Image (cartoon, rainbow, N blue to C red):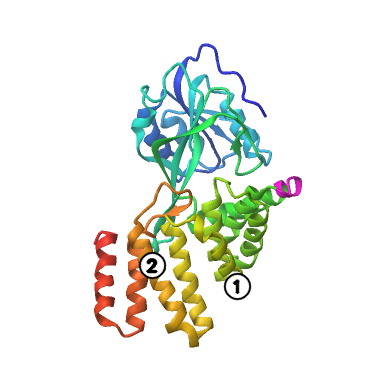
Amino acid sequence: MADRPPLEHALTRLALVMIARDEARSIVRALASAAPHVDRMIVLDTGSTDDTRALAQAAGAEVFDFAWRDDFAAARNAALDRSDAAWNLILDADEWIEGGAESLAPARLPAAGGDFLGLVQVASEMGAGDEASSARSWIARVLPAGVRYEGRIHEQPASRLRGERLALVIGHDGYTPESLARKGDRNEALLTAELAAHPHDAYLWFQLAKEYQARDRSAQAALCFAEALRLARPDEPFRHALVVRAITAFKTEGRLDEALALLEAEFPNWQASPDFFFAMGDLYLAVAGREPDKALSDHLPLAEFAWKKCLELGERQDLDGSVAGRGSHMPAHNLAVMYETLGLAEPAARYRALAVQLRGG
């Protein structure tokens, strides 16, 4: 799909454009975070049976109805058709503006429009308690007038415009157990249908693998990651996340030799990635369990090297698919546990204290 021509005389500089269904839990938070930074808020309701519509209207949004037809791009495009703005900020109801809102100001997004897609960091909350973290992805969410979507699910802007990274950070809590339980079956069905039509699309295989991984269906996840790797080009923008997640998936499923082969093949490409080295450390810990006779001589020293490399590199939020903590407290914690297991009290205490410090208390 080619870009539609921009509006000749946009009446609005920046509009928030959202699709929603049964999002009473979070939609007010999303709209309140955006309201100070946009000139108009548009919500397309796809069939809510809760208070989503009323809450959105009370928060200042214009709400329109749309009959859902199992196609996210169709809904996104119908919402965009309601906008008269030079720029459109795309948010979901389980998201909110967390930081970097200055990148939405007229100095960055002028009323005359522009010729780029604004890439923003989406920080998705993962886990809970001591295991809580966030995974960050760079996604086009600020679109100039005329850009539309394609794809039944995990839809993408159908545009040849270049992407420019903005400082905007969007929080997202849609991977909570409750959200996964509510939306997981729907997403799986839509991805399966989309793959039936596009069986050679590496990105779709990657998304289905992530869906299974988030729902602890490790066998299906490993199969889908393997297919995504087979089809993906070396320069895919999601390659970093694909490789790191696939290593973890193969390890979880006990396919250690496949994980080791992938690690070796990709090792030269990710020398600046704490996520890659974190996965490497976890993998060699698993290999040590499989081959205890070589644990002390071979495998645990490699795990130790990998986790220390994470600390050397530090956090790399600029890498797509990076997980907060893998360049700080998480490898420090793993090193502490390993040294404790080996009876090495002094380094164990040192890294335990470092983990607490890096975690912020």
In the rendered image, residue 238 lying in the magenta stretch gets the answer no
Of the 4 image quadrants, the one containing the C terminus is bottom left
Residue 5 drawn above or below residue 326: above
Q: Which residues are magenta?
A: 194-200
Disc 1 marks a residue whose amino acid type is: Asp
Label 1: how many residues lie within 10 Å, few (<14), some (14-19) or many (20+)? few
Residue 133 drawn above or below residue 283: above
Q: Position of residue 96 (x, y in %)?
A: 41, 41
The residue that disc 1 covers is: 257
**Residue reaching furthest to the top:** 9
Disc 2 marks a residue whose amino acid type is: Trp
Q: Residue 307 — which label?
A: 2
**Could you tell me if the residues under marks 1 and 2 are in contact, i.e. CB atoms within 8 Å?**
no
Q: Position of residue 294 (x, y in %)?
A: 48, 84
- The residue lying toward the viewer, choosing from 159 and 177, is 159
- The residue lying toward the viewer, choosing from 249 and 64, is 249
Residue 215 shows in the view: no
**Residue reaching furthest to the bottom:** 293
Quarter residue 359 falls in: bottom left
- The residue lying toward the viewer, choosing from 101 and 182, is 101
How much space separates mark 1 and mark 2, taking CA atoms?
A: 20 Å
- The residue lying toward the viewer, choosing from 195 and 17, is 195
Q: State the residue at coordinates (42%, 78%).
A: 300
Disc nearer the start of the sequence (1/2): 1
> What element does badge 1 sit on?
helix
Q: Position of residue 81 (x, y in %)?
A: 59, 24
